[in-house]
Amino acid sequence: MKNFQYVRASTPESAITAVTKDGTAQFLAGGTNLVDLMKKGVAAPDKLIDITGLDIKKIEERQGTLHIGAMALNSVVAADALVKKQQPLLALALLKGASQQIRNMATVGGNMLQRTRCPYFYNTDLPCNKREPGTGCGALKGFNRMHAIFGASESCIAVHPSDMCIALVALDATVVVKGLKGERRIPFADFHRLPGDQPQLDHTLARGEMIMGLEIPANQFGSHVHYLKVRDRASYAFALISVAAAIRIDGNTIADVRLAMGGVAHKPWRLTAAEQFLKGKAATEGNFREAAKLAMSNATGYGHNNFKLKLAPNSIVEALTKAAAAS
Ligand code: SF4
């Protein structure tokens, strides 16, 4: 690993200034992904600005909106009574991510900025447009079992690895970020990006902008939520497919529904066409299957991951069925 300078930030402003003005500096939060990337030579910052001591860890309700600080630990958020009561889908998704030890270190902001687990990205001997633009995509015609079926490009077919973010896009969260020019808010669905011809860019943050926290609006889904994660082993594995589902049934009719998938695209993938189809319909398996069919209309397999084309719609139906039945 390359030598680097380590600085502990005392205020968000000093950290933002340091990273904005020094092109080789990076924020360091829990380090559960960044330190791995540095060990493997994928990331090589000259300076790390440790932001874990900043006072942006609170979880609180303000006028019906749940606010979560960017440095709140994943394990703390998952166990928080307010989160479990107001946004149980978020707690469920967090508990499906990584392991308890990693959740004890990983922060909310770091979780959002973790990088893909595409094996070609982590192996500096292999071509990868995300790690080294212009070198090609090793996965496109290579071993692409874990890769995208939606929104990919010829440049990159990687998937976003987080579970937490799949719940957050379904819950219409907003990301609060701060830079030298002040604060701004980004709808969660616009925070991560598709690869296009710039797969090296995972998100829409400007250089030096820091994630300050999340705002999650109140909803009426109650406990009718489910986070389904299909993976190769029961713990500490990334999703082959995941589905975040929330449903509100009024009498016999679906009054509101949210659906998002993980393990399928370069960003958390919201299933808006399926949501629109389901609103006003009865909560039956037949309607769930029709919605899943709609959700899959633009899906493409790349060979080894063709199994996802069947697994994904079945997972959507299962997640909706379990959300509707949850109590
Ligand atoms: Fe790199 Fe993306 Fe291709 Fe993986 S899928 S090798 S991350 S360019």
Image (spheres, grey):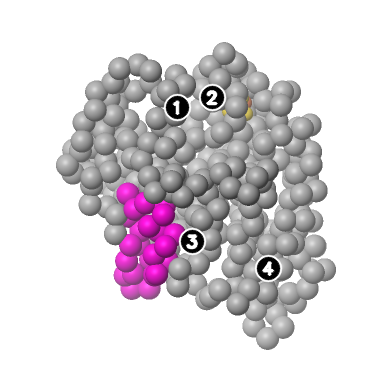
Element on which disc 1 rests: helix
Q: Which mark is residue 37?
A: 1
Task: Choose the circle earlier in sequence order: 2 or 1.
Answer: 1
The quarter in which the N terminus is drawn is top left
Percent x, y for residue 203?
47, 39
Near-viewer residue (272 or 216): 216
**Mark 4 and mark 3: span between their CA atoms?**
16 Å
Part of the protein shown in magenta = 59-83
Queried on whether the Cβ of the residue with tag 2 lies below 8 angstroms from ligand 1, the answer reads: no
Element on which disc 4 rests: helix
Q: Which residue is mark 3?
A: 91
Q: Which residue is mark 4?
A: 322
Q: Which mark is residue 122?
A: 2
Task: Choose the circle earlier in sequence order: 4 or 1.
Answer: 1
Element on which disc 2 rests: helix
Residue at x 44% of width, y 59% of height: 78
- Amino acid type at mark 4: Lys
Q: Where 266 falls versus 87 (above or below)?
A: above
Residue at x 75% of width, y 44% of height: 308
The part of the image, by quadrant, that contains residue 253 is bottom right
- Amino acid type at mark 3: Ala
